[in-house]
Amino acid sequence: MILYGISNCDTVKKARRWLEQNGVDFRFHDLRKDGLERSQLESWERELGWESLLNRRGTTWRKLPEEQKAGINDAQSAIDLMLAQPSIIKRPLLVIQGKTILGFSEESYSKLFKA
């Protein structure tokens, strides 16, 4: 099981803490430090959709020029942006048994792990 995110993200910190406190064995992959393969991102896009993966509420998105934001209108343009700026990907992404869980809530993790 791999938890993808960015180490200084508060939501990722909460997810990591929850997994550790509940004895769930996982590996953490920092999207900025460890990188991200296009094939992995394309796989998430097929499973979750680019609109779900793209964090339009975060600082990275808000700092983009309006013309660049307007150009993000399909999977390819979104993937290119996410590869260039991994902090624009919603997080955390938990990959477990071939399934990807986007985001974190104690309730959803408790159900997933029957904690």
Image (cartoon, rainbow, N blue to C red):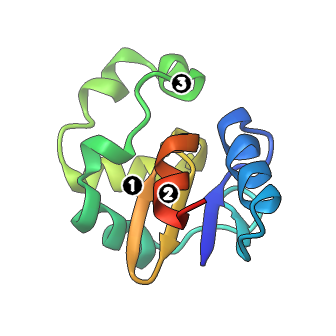
- Disc number placed over residue 80 in the picture, else none: 1
Residue that appears at 49% across and 76% down: 96
In this picture, residue 14 sits left or right of residue 60: right
What kind of residue is marked 3? Gly
What residue did someone put label 2 on?
83
Q: Are marks 3 and 2 in contact (CB under 8 Å)?
A: no
Query: Is residue 75 shown above or below 62?
Result: below
Where residue 114 appears, as percent x and y from the top left, is 53, 63
Where residue 92 appears, as percent x and y from the top left, is 57, 50
Label 1, secondary structure: give it.
Answer: helix
Q: Which image quadrant is residue 71 in?
A: top left
- Disc number placed over residue 58 in the picture, else none: 3
Q: Nearer the viewer, residue 25 or 65?
A: 25
Q: Residues within 10 Å of mark 3 (few under 14, many from 20)?
A: few
Label 3 or label 2, whichever comes before in sequence order = 3
Mark 1 or mark 3: which is in front? 3
Label 3, secondary structure: give it.
Answer: loop
Alpha carbon separation for disc pair 1 and 3: 18 Å
In this picture, residue 86 sits left or right of residue 48: right
